[in-house]
Image (cartoon, rainbow, N blue to C red):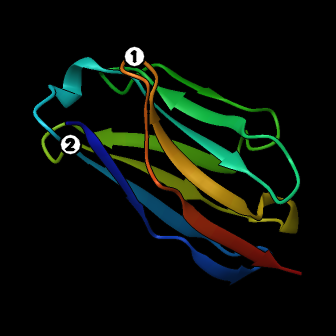
Amino acid sequence: QVQLVESGGGLVQAGGSLRLSCATSGGHTFSTYDMAWYRQAPGKEREFVTSIGTSGVNTAYAESVKGRFTITRGNVKNTVYLQMNSLKPEDTAIYYCHNPNLGYWGQGTHVTISS
């Protein structure tokens, strides 16, 4: 069974940085699947943050994070990363790793940005 495990969340001040990781396992060929990050802020619906294609070349970002967040992947380590810079209080949310091809989600990692 495919598992996605996020890590790297925490509490940082506005303007700071965090790097999230999503380690995948479970007998699937990680390098053949797109990957994505979503987030859900308190009282709001889950929203798309960013995605990355199989080779790591093709990426997409929500307008709200463009220029601040960067998604990368390590196909040897079966891990996808989210580097978040210039964080804002409105980035506070639970961040979820997602395999859009297989439909799997991680359990989420909490990110809190203080003003």
**Residue ID for mark 1:** 101
**Residue ID for mark 2:** 78
Tell me the residue at 88%/55% (across/down): 43
Q: Is 46 located above or below residue 96 in the figure?
A: above
* Numbered disc 1: secondary structure: loop
* Numbered disc 2: secondary structure: loop
Label 2 to label 1: alpha-carbon separation: 15 Å
Tell me the residue at 60%/54% (across/down): 95
- Residue 4's x, y, as percent? 34, 47
Amino acid type at circle 2 is: Asn
Q: Quadrant of residue 2?
A: top left
Q: Nearer the viewer, mark 2 or mark 1?
A: 1
Query: Viewed as shown, does residue 36 lie left or right of 34?
Result: right
Quarter of the image for the N terminus: give it: top left
- Residue 63's x, y, as percent? 80, 33
Between residue 45 and residue 51, name the one nearer to us.
45
